């Protein structure tokens, strides 16, 4: 698939002086997608081949950071103490000390008996917490959708080993994180019902049975918030004459590094304009894709197999010849 996509992109770019034009496809949820093959929906290797050497800046823990922007509003509406560390200890730990947070959870979830490879564990935990942030179910039971297809809960697909999943959902920090996220989810959904009841009649915010979908409402709110804050990033960059070469939802790509001082200035604008102090941009250097010959790799593999077969054959001849001499 990646090869077919790359040939399509190359065919177009070869007649447009290296540019690959993409037709915008706005979503009612707030994001901008693109029709057909795009920089958003190809795999990371092909994306590197499309963009070449560049810098990626993405929002750290974007959905959790977005929700925490409403934490003080939730505490005020609930008549609770405004001490955020008291009400959201796990969420703040996740945002401010993520590496330690993940390492601690991993220690208690993945025991020595776990079949999950060590290098895969951080990725699975990251996916699990992201799923929880979007309201993933904690049940292990699946269900039939409207089309008659069986669907497993997201956490079941992510943490497939049942013992690991049980330890994950039983962990005190994880349970606390889920409780805090659920409180913010309920608060945001209640705000939406209060101020935009008209949108609850839109089909794209309803379940298959026609009832308002809390999960879809939260996705709608988040994606609009994501677009708003990324627009701030784009505007700040354009003010300095920096044009992004690609946008992938909560990530933006530039040909050159922004520099620490300018990155800090953009983050300040993100926080100031949205009244959310939890926005952070994480820079990552992207190196252009280095082509490799699949034919050469295949020939090398076949050559090694021939050598192994010849060595086995030689050992067989040697054994037979030895038996003749000694027999």
Image (cartoon, grey):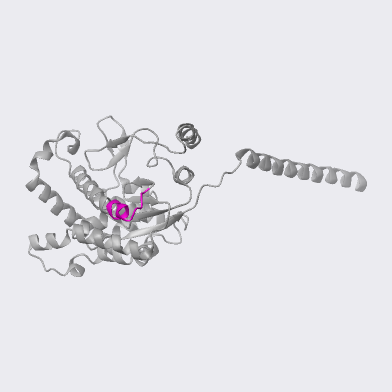
Q: Which x, y percent locates residue 1?
A: 47, 34
User: How many labels sit on residues?
Assistant: 0
Residue 243 magenta: yes
Residue in the image at 9% along x and 39% along y? 198
Q: Which x, y percent locates residue 289?
A: 52, 47
Instruction: Find residue 171 and report its image quarter.
Output: bottom left
Residue in the image at 46% along x and 36% along y? 17
Quarter occupied by the C terminus: top right
Instruction: Find residue 283 and report its image quarter.
Output: bottom left
Judge left or right: residue 283 versus residue 200.
right
Q: Which x, y percent locates residue 226?
A: 25, 50
Above or below, 46 relative to 55: above
Residue in the image at 85% along x and 46% along y? 318
Judge left or right: residue 276 versus residue 322.
left
Residue in the image at 66% along x and 42% along y? 301
Q: Residue furthest top?
A: 147
- Note whether residue 164 is visible: no
| Front position in the image: 218 or 238 | 238
Residue 159 magenta: no
| Front position in the image: 65 or 284 | 284
Instruction: Find residue 143 and report its image quarter.
Output: top left
Magenta range: 234-244
Judge left or right: residue 256 versus residue 302.
left
Q: Which x, y percent locates residue 70?
A: 17, 58
| Front position in the image: 152 or 48 | 48
Above or below, 305 relative to 116: above
- Note whether residue 67 is visible: yes
């Amino acid at each position: 698939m990646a090869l077919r996509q790359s040939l399509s992109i190359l065919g177009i770019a070869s007649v447009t002086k290296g540019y690959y034009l993409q037709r915008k496809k706005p979503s009612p949820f707030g994001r901008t997608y693109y029709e057909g093959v795009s920089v958003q929906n190809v795999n990371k290797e092909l994306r590197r081949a499309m963009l070449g050497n560049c810098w990626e800046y993405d929002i750290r823990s974007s959905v959790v950071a977005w929700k925490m922007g409403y934490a003080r509003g939730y505490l005020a509406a609930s008549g609770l103490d405004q001490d955020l560390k008291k009400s959201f200890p796990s969420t703040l730990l996740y945002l401010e000390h993520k590496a330690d947070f993940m390492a601690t959870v991993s220690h208690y979830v993945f025991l020595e008996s776990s079949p999950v490879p060590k290098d895969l564990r951080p990725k699975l935990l990251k996916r699990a917490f992201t799923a929880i942030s979007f309201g993933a179910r904690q049940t292990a039971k699946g269900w039939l959708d409207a089309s008659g297809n069986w669907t497993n809960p997201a956490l079941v697909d992510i943490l497939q080993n049942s013992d690991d999943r049980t330890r994950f959902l039983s962990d005190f920090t994880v349970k606390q994180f889920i409780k805090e996220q659920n409180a913010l989810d309920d608060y945001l959904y209640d705000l939406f019902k209060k101020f935009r009841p008209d949108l609850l009649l839109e089909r794209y915010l309803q379940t298959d049975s026609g009832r308002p979908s809390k999960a879809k409402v939260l996705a709608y709110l988040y994606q609009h918030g994501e677009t708003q804050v990324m627009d701030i990033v784009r505007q700040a960059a354009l003010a300095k004459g920096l044009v992004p070469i690609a946008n992938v939802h909560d990530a933006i790509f530039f040909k050159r590094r922004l520099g620490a001082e300018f990155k800090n200035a953009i983050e300040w604008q993100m926080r100031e304009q949205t009244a959310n102090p939890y926005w952070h941009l994480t820079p990552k250097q992207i190196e252009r894709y280095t082509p490799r010959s699949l034919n050469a790799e295949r020939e090398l593999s076949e050559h090694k197999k021939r050598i192994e077969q010849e060595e086995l054959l030689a050992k067989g001849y040697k054994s037979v010849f030895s038996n003749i001499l000694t027999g």
